């Protein structure tokens, strides 16, 4: 039998075989070895022993990331006419204090009370419970997926919990499954209660664990030689958008809706980094802040995505301890108020289309809605795009309606009017709520915090003021301020009364819809989803990366080491590169099959073979990676077809209509 690896034989038509990408089970160990060997990415400072959670991208990984980001820019910034930013990584402490990150940007960690080994509490609880459920399946004779192994022994101890074949009572299994469905909804104290209730210990030592404590995830630094200006490496790019809102609004002629977008590095000092690119301390984010009228969250292009089908995991299903998903169009999800508004639904639909375009398997993707405890207090709604890999379901994109929180707190703190003014066609009389303070009592009660509380109350929208007014009618109301604290006010300190005013201008703080993309997580998921092995040879791995994101678009090889042929492949490569096709020449002495196999591992979608017919007839063959089918044509015609394939203006069927099928009779003997 002629193997698929043979790219040029006397009878290439024998290569036309059905593609079976599931002939072999996915092997993560083999994929990891491939990614390391071909230098997609590697631990940073590896020759010094490395640092957990820091990775360097090699030539292929860098190109893959650049191509994914290029598609992201085209899909969002170009198509949506967004305003692109590039803001500083080093962020002033006051900015992150105002946004709440200094006080609240934390995870819960526990320690081995004897060794001091540290674990992230929710991840440890999840790993132990999953191991117990796996042991129950083993005891019942139910086959389960193999546990994902880490190469690094030190990481293995933290990541993997060995399962023991012990049958559990049915009610215990149900309790565990319900617990896992809600794992993201537990507070620190609740995680501590779970540790005690289920006797969760350090899997390696069996020692007891401490109570969970909060650990702030930001890297702290100082700005300038005196050390008096405190700063942090940003944990997200979002605050750079918000502090520049006034300039962005002016650039957009004072009109909303509009969006700003940014691609850049962010940093989080993870408690126990693991899972390769899925949990790291330095990573690339791509974030959008879409500013919208709080009274009108419709989207002008909603009709373009209303028929896009999403796989939804709503919050009420999770709160019941279940994980069943529902397939539903964006239009239906918004109409049924499962998704809060059109603009949020629009970005969910656009995100689904983007992830599919770059090669994420839609059958292994879902939208999970945040539950009450994990949702930010200011958010109206939030959905995570989770992608399934060998590590389970991993959040890769978050789409949140952040309401007006960020712009409001920064406006109060800086006394800058981060608001939109719209001239009304006709003056109108409107009812507002007027806030009056007993200045003496208010100042004596709150002292240095009085000004902050006043500014917070004066900056609130009418609906929130009405809630406070109603609460004051019964006694006390709590006001949350930009410092993250809540203050109790009473009717003797503040009075809120309705007044009627004539408005010539409408003034409001925009709400913000934020899609936030973790590029490293998407990239790794894409690599897993793209990997498979040839049916005839399990060792022949292939990355079926779409041509739009593949690091190298076309391989150029020759059938022999003839000097004239070697010169020709470099000439063809230069022609391709001049028109923007990332081509790679392999002029080694390896066989044609070996050359193509090496580039199948890199995800190279197309390959051109130069032989003696190229010299005599001016023809070259064009090979498609997955099927190994081949076409033949004049050099310039083939280059033009490759250009169209790479740009996505034609597919392989379109290429087959432009070029002749290669049968072998076109060969010229040496």
Image (cartoon, grey):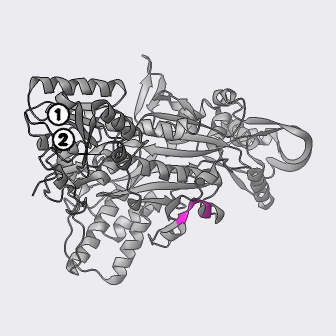
Q: At x 85% / y 47%, what residue is drawn?
A: 432
Q: Which residues, given as a range, are shown in magenta?
A: 328-332
Query: The N terminus lies in which quarter of the figure?
Result: bottom left
Q: Which mark is residue 520?
A: none
Q: Is residue 330 magenta?
A: yes
* First of labels 2, 1 by sequence position: 1
Q: Is residue 493 magenta?
A: no
Q: Which residue is mark 1?
A: 613
SS assignment for the magenta stretch, majority:
helix
Which percent across, then down, holds residue 254?
72, 31
Of residues 239 and 340, the one nearer the viewer is 340
Q: What element does badge 1 sit on?
A: helix
Which percent across, then down, holds residue 262?
50, 34
CA gap, disc 2 and disc 1: 7 Å
Tell me if residue 638 comes above or below residue 578 in the rendering: below
Of residues 631 and 492, the one nearer the viewer is 631
Tell me if residue 494 comes above or below residue 388 in the rendering: above
Q: Is residue 49 left or right of residue 552?
A: left
The image shows a total of numbered marks equal to 2
Q: In this orientation, does residue 379 appear?
A: no
Q: Residues within 10 Å of mark 2 (few under 14, many from 20)?
A: some
Tell me if residue 350 comes above or below residue 449 in the rendering: below
Q: In this orientation, does residue 446 appear?
A: yes
Q: Residue furthest top?
A: 225
Q: Which residue is mark 2?
A: 666
Of residues 375 and 9, the one nearer the viewer is 9
Q: Is residue 7 left or right of residue 242?
A: left
Q: Is residue 638 left or right of residue 216?
A: left
Tell whether label 1 touches label 2 (CB within 8 Å).
yes
């Amino acid at each position: 039998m002629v193997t698929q690896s043979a790219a040029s034989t006397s009878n290439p038509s024998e290569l036309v075989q059905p593609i079976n990408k599931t002939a072999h089970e996915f092997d993560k160990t083999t994929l990891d070895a491939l990614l390391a060997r071909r230098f997609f990415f590697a631990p940073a400072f590896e020759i010094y022993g490395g640092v957990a959670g820091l990775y360097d991208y090699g030539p292929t990984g860098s190109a893959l990331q650049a191509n994914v980001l290029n598609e992201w820019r085209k899909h969002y910034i170009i198509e949506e006419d967004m305003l692109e930013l590039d803001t500083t990584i080093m962020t002033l402490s006051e900015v992150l204090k105002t946004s709440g990150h200094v006080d609240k940007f934390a995870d819960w960690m526990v320690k081995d009370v004897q060794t001091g080994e540290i674990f992230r509490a929710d991840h440890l609880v999840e790993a132990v419970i999953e191991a117990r459920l796996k042991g129950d399946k083993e005891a019942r004779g139910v086959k389960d997926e193999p546990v994902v192994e880490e190469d690094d022994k030190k990481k293995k101890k933290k990541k993997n919990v060995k399962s023991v074949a012990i049958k559990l009572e049915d009610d215990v299994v149900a309790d565990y499954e319900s617990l896992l469905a809600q794992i993201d909804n537990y507070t620190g104290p609740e995680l501590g209660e779970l540790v005690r209730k289920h006797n969760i210990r350090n899997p390696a030592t069996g020692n007891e664990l401490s109570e969970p404590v909060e650990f702030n995830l930001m890297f702290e630094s100082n700005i300038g030689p005196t050390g008096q200006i405190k700063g942090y490496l940003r944990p997200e790019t979002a605050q750079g958008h918000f502090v520049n809102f006034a300039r962005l609004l002016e650039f957009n002629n004072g009109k909303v809706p509009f969006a700003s977008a940014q691609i850049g590095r962010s940093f989080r000092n993870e408690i126990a980094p693991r899972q390769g690119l899925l949990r790291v301390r330095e990573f690339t984010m791509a974030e959008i802040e879409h500013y919208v009228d709080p009274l009108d969250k419709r989207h002008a292009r909603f009709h373009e995505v209303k028929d896009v089908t999403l796989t939804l995991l709503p919050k009420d299903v999770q709160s019941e301890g279940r994980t069943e998903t529902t397939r539903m169009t964006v239009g239906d999800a918004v109409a049924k108020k499962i998704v809060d508004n059109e603009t949020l639904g629009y970005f969910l639909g656009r995100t689904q289309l983007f992830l599919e375009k770059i090669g994420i398997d839609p059958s292994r993707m879902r939208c999970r809605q945040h539950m009450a405890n994990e949702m930010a207090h200011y958010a109206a709604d939030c959905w995570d795009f989770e992608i399934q890999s060998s590590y389970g379901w991993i959040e890769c994109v978050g789409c949140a309606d952040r309401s007006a929180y960020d712009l409001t707190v920064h406006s109060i703190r800086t006394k800058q009017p981060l608001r939109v003014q719209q001239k009304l066609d006709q003056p109108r009389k409107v009812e507002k709520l007027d806030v009056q303070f007993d200045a003496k009592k208010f100042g004596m009660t709150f002292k240095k915090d009085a000004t902050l509380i006043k500014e917070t109350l004066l900056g609130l929208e009418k609906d929130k003021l009405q809630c406070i007014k109603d609460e004051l009618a019964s006694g006390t109301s709590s006001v949350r301020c930009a410092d993250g604290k809540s203050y109790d006010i009473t009717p003797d300190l503040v009075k809120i009364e309705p007044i009627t005013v004539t408005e010539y201008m409408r003034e409001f703080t925009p709400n913000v819809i934020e899609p936030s993309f973790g590029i490293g997580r998407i990239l790794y998921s894409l690599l897993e989803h793209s990997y498979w092995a040839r049916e005839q040879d399990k060792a022949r791995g292939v990355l079926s990366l779409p041509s739009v994101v593949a690091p190298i678009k076309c391989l150029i090889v020759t059938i022999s080491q003839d000097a004239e042929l070697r010169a020709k492949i470099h000439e063809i490569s230069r022609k391709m590169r001049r028109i923007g096709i990332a081509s790679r020449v392999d002029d080694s002495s390896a066989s044609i099959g070996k050359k193509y196999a090496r580039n199948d591992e890199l995800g190279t979608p197309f390959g051109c073979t130069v032989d003696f017919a190229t010299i005599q007839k001016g023809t070259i063959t064009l090979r498609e990676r997955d099927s190994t089918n081949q076409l033949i044509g004049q050099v310039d015609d083939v280059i033009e077809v490759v250009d169209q394939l790479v740009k996505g203006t034609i597919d392989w069927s379109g290429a087959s209509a432009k070029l002749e099928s290669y049968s072998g009779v076109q060969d010229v003997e040496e």
